[in-house]
């Protein structure tokens, strides 16, 4: 009979490995968002988006609001891809609906990429980049909650893209989660988005 | 180890996103602990845990109503850890910047056991065959029963007991030397 009696040495060794790690609230957000997005797309596309979520994390607002942002982005992406716009009303009824990303035919324009930006004092934020011709009206972001982060989904074709957030219609701000772009023709700060081929 | 209310995974299985968030919040620390102990790298561990939860989310339709959630979750997580461990071994000759090994980070357990002891345990753990390390961690750190570990690993009970015994023998022999 094999026994694995836990003597003092083994008990001490096991306890030295048993401390629970500190949890970064962003990690929980990233998992819930990644899961929601992953279900909505083919595996190759999902890997691209998962890569986005694994970029270095920011210290943002409360976890609850971030999770709400993640779920909104995820379900909007799913709805945009499946055309099941009517399901948004029931699944995200507590949260604003990101209509710009949910328009018909959005999926054909490229890979959906969730965008989240924390700007507590902003009155409006839009995503501008080469994927939407730097059009400030193309992809407005929606604030999640009263003072939560801003969220939207953009569709970008595989390849390298340059983008930024336009705050209050006047100030271009680079995405702090992404590498800084050095070749921004539009002027102002901008970031690089890499979208792999699905 | 307390398990989550069995109703929660069933709610998640039925499509309740809040239940899924509840599951992630409840199990994330344990999953990250297991993955860190298995992989020895924070970055690899976080990747394994995220992948595992995404697969859980995708696989909920296949989760049986009468099944227990813990072994099911840990089976998915252990599979991800094995895959990432194999990938890391293939790339172990590469130097990775920006990813401190777990042992280099300040750890709460060092305050209780002393840095040398905790470090020695981790060093010995890294030298164990991966199947012994996995069995030891599931049994003595995650506190799973042998029946649950069998469900996680797909290995028979007697083989599991042997793996745990061998891991314990190695740890005991080397740690006893450290104490002398």
Image (spheres, coloured by chain):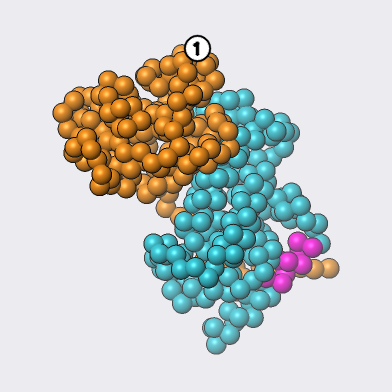
Q: Residue furthest left?
A: A170
Question: Magenta stretch: dominant SS?
Answer: helix
**Magenta-span inclusion, residue B11:** no
Q: Nearer the viewer, residue B179 or A172?
A: A172
Residue B73 shown left or right of residue A100 in the figure: right
Q: Colour of chain A?
A: orange
**For this rendering, which residue is in front, A72 or B14?**
A72
Residue in the picture at 62% in, 60% down: B86
Residue B89, percent across and down? Answer: 59, 65
In this picture, residue A137 sits left or right of residue A103: left
- Residue identifier under label 1: A86
Q: Which residues are magenta?
A: B159-167
For residue B87, what is the image quadrant?
bottom right
The residue at the point 49 percent across, 14 percent down is A85
Q: Quadrant of residue A124?
A: top left
The cyan one among the chains is B
């Amino acid at each position: 009979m094999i026994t694995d009696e836990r003597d003092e040495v083994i008990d001490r060794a096991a306890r030295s490995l048993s401390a629970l790690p500190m949890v970064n609230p962003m990690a929980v957000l990233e998992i819930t968002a990644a899961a929601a997005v992953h279900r909505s797309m083919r595996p190759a596309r999902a890997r691209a988006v998962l890569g986005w979520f694994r970029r270095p994390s920011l210290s943002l607002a409360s976890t609850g609001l971030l999770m709400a942002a993640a779920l909104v982005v995820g379900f909007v992406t799913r709805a945009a891809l499946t055309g099941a716009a009517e399901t948004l009303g029931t699944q995200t009824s507590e949260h604003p609906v990101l209509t710009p990303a949910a328009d018909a035919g959005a999926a054909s324009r490229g890979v959906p990429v969730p965008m989240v930006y924390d700007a507590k004092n902003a009155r409006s934020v839009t995503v501008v980049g080469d994927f939407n011709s730097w059009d400030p009206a193309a992809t407005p972001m929606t604030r999640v909650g009263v003072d939560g982060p801003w969220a939207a989904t953009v569709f970008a074709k595989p390849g390298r893209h340059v983008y930024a957030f336009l705050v209050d219609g006047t100030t271009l701000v680079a995405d702090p989660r992404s590498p800084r772009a050095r070749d921004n023709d539009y002027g102002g700060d901008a970031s690089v988005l890499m979208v792999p081929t699905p | 180890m307390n398990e989550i209310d069995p109703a929660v995974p069933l709610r998640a299985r039925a499509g309740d996103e809040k239940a899924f968030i509840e599951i992630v919040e409840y199990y994330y620390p344990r999953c990250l602990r297991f993955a860190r102990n298995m992989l020895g790298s924070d970055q690899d561990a976080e990747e394994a845990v995220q992948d595992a939860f995404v697969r859980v989310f995708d696989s909920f339709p296949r989760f049986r109503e009468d099944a227990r959630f813990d072994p099911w979750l840990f089976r998915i997580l252990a599979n991800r850890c094995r895959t990432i461990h194999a990938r890391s071994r293939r790339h172990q000759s590469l130097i990775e910047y920006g990813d401190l090994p777990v042992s280099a980070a300040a750890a709460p357990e060092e305050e209780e056991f002393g840095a040398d002891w905790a470090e020695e345990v981790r060093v010995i753990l890294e030298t164990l065959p991966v199947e012994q390390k996995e069995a030891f961690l599931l049994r003595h750190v995650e506190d799973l029963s042998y029946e649950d570990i069998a469900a996680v690993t797909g290995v028979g009970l007697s083989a599991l007991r042997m793996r745990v015994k061998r891991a314990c023998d190695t740890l005991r022999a080397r740690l006893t030397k450290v104490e002398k």
